[in-house]
Amino acid sequence: MTELFLKNIQLEPLSKHDPHGVVFYANDKIYRAINEKYSQIYRDLFRHPDIDHLFEKGLIETSLTDYKMSGYDLILEHRKVQFTNYCVEWSHQMIRDAAGMLINLELELLSMGYSLKDHHPWNIFFQFSKPKFIDVASIEPKGSQPNHAKIFSNILLFYGVPLFLLRMFGRRPTKWYMLNMSYVDIAPLGIMINRIFRHTAKVLVWLLELLGISTEKLLIYFSNRFHKNKSVREGKWSNYYRRGIKPPLYQEIDSFTQKETGALEILKHLREENCKTVIDIGSNEGFFANLCENLGYDVVALDSDEAAIDRLYKLLTLDHNNILPVIMDFKNPTPMSGKYFLHHDYAQRFRCDVLLGMAIIHHLVFSSNMSFEHIAAKIGALASHYAIVEFIPPNDVYVARWMKPQYSWYTLENFLKAMSPYFECKRIVDSHPSPRVIILFARINS
């Protein structure tokens, strides 16, 4: 057996308060060390003949190892999720599918003699378009009487309420609610709402038993409801870049514009230089994200438009592409959050080899009131090697309408200057329509 020493590993701060053990990283892999008190539970679980059923339902793929570490009795290895993502960054349908996955996983666990003690959405990451439950230590033997009231209240509290808020009031109050729910056991609001739902769920379970209705049947009903597709109200920019071209995009290359051909050539060159990941800022319906994925990149498709990302996600669920759709405002990205502020910020999670920003800079300036320096700093935080940025100059037919004296600084020369502390300009090529250009930046000392 191989002994693991603390000096060779990196502990995950979020797991420091878990009584079952700790999560840590070693050699670009993810492990979980289990205390002796709980180790037999997980040995039995991962030797169960139906363990593959749990992975099919959404449990993160996990295996027993022969590793040993001082102070722990068992080491598990988890499949690595490419990009850590949080529930406040999911679209409407992503929240629904995460809830449906969780219910199906719970039903499968109950059939095997186990249950989840924590149904929190912060314990779910999307592996591209597939929700995965990552908190293996939340699985426990169900006992003689599983706590159905707790299951129902958690589903309503963590998934039902956010979906209602999102449908009725939009992204901002939903995000506020979900961030507060990450403090469910310490924030006054979280404690109060938690108690209300616990008591409501107890009454519901009592009524079901009185009527002779199986709680499992109600869970199945909830799962089916969550998995139904629901449309989302379109925003101002939901249809900004709808090309109507279905991947694989190489089959449609003859119809590419100069803009799309220019981006393709640069992306192919960077892929040959062994760049592997791309974050597409202002992805919209995902044309360029799909283009990157066709070239072999793993992609984060980021946009603040709810309808565009929801539509992209629904398309990705059909093809299982290596694209993670994320709703996030580039100006106000997801900060560190959670109890003890241990949930990582956006730059730690979404930093990629290449940042792609097509037709986005002028929107950030004129709609979001960002300076070139602010934009450059954000790009620098997310691009570890290269940035491909389309710049629309002041004499462009659309930008000219927005130009006012206070934006006299909006020039290509000033944009290149703002980027210079982080990047070197390597190439400028024509885009479409003229006079737009695409700029390839290389990270300084990357």
Image: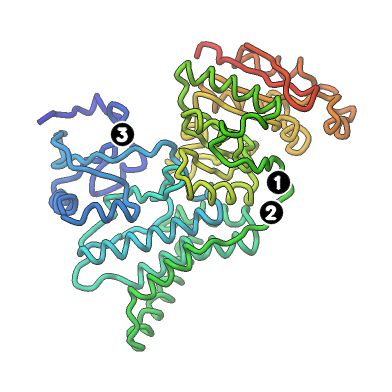
Q: Is residue 192 visible?
A: no
Q: CA distance from mark 2 to mark 3?
A: 42 Å
Name which quarter of the figure residue 15 lies in.
top left
Residue at image point 59% right, 40% down: 286
Decide: is 317 above or below 241: below
Q: Is residue 124 visible?
A: yes
**Picture coordinates of residue 267, whole percent (x, y):** 56, 23
| Amino acid type of the residue tagged 1 in the rendering | Asn
Which residue is denoted by mark 3 in the rendering?
11
| Amino acid type of the residue tagged 3 in the rendering | Leu
Decide: is 388 above or below 55: above
Which residue is denoted by mark 1 in the rendering?
239
Q: Secondary structure at mark 3?
A: strand
Which residue is denoted by mark 2 in the rendering?
234
Q: Earlier in the sequence, mark 2 or mark 3?
A: 3
89 left or right, relative to 212: right
CA neighbours of label 1 inside 10 A, class few (<14), some (14 to 19), many (20+): some
**Picture coordinates of residue 370, whole percent (x, y):** 72, 32
